[in-house]
Image: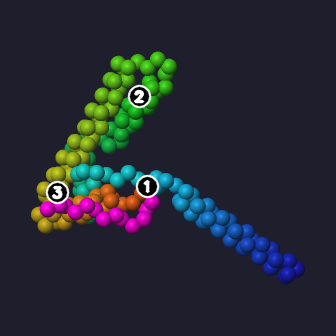
Amino acid sequence: MKEFLSRKWLHVILFVSLAVNLFLAGFLVSRAMMPSGHARSHSPHGLSAIARHMSPEDRRELFRHLKRDGHPFRESHEQLARLRQQAMDLLMTENVDRARLEKVLAAEREAHLKIISRVQNALVDRLMAMPLEQRRKIIEETRETLRAKRFKRADNGPRKSPPSPGP
């Protein structure tokens, strides 16, 4: 009876080990097959890229500032999603109502610009409240990150040397 129990547990352990190994192999193969950059989220550009280099407390303060000013995050993004869906629905019809599509796209652009403007203004306000040295450090880190990403190879190999600034 003891031999049966030990074989049973051995089978369970082997099965679990096999399942874990298959999962890891599938994960690694899928990552290797994925186009470069596909798994990564979009990197912010411009002023919004600066927020990634701010301390967690500064980012929290930035979002508190936006909330204090009544920035409706969820509602704004839900409105954008509805407008994008309307545009896609219009584009899927056989006879696209061009005038209506242009109105929806203009409303989407306006809503998007409103969000960008509010976030940029809050970010600038937060940066202006910082000491100059802290602000300079954040800006330099952001510049270096954006510069490095721009010259990163598509195959995730070593970075190419950026062009020299010239004479």
In the foreground, 36 or 109: 36
Q: Residues within 10 Å of mark 2 (few under 14, many from 20)?
A: some
Q: Quadrant of the C terminus?
A: bottom left
Q: Secondary structure at mark 3?
A: helix
Mark 2 vs mark 3: give the one in front: 2
* First of labels 2, 1 by sequence position: 1
In this rendering, position of residue 80 left or right of residue 164: right
Q: Disc 1 designates what residue?
A: 37
Q: Check disc 3 and report the residue beneath it.
A: 127
Q: Amino acid at mark 1?
A: Gly
Q: Are marks 2 and 3 in contact (CB under 8 Å)?
A: no
Please report the bounds of the magenta region as a residue range. Answer: 155-167
Which one is closest to the eye, mark 2 or mark 1? 1
Q: Can residue 102 be seen? A: yes
Q: CA distance from mark 2 to mark 3?
A: 36 Å
User: Does residue 59 appear in the picture of this structure?
Assistant: no
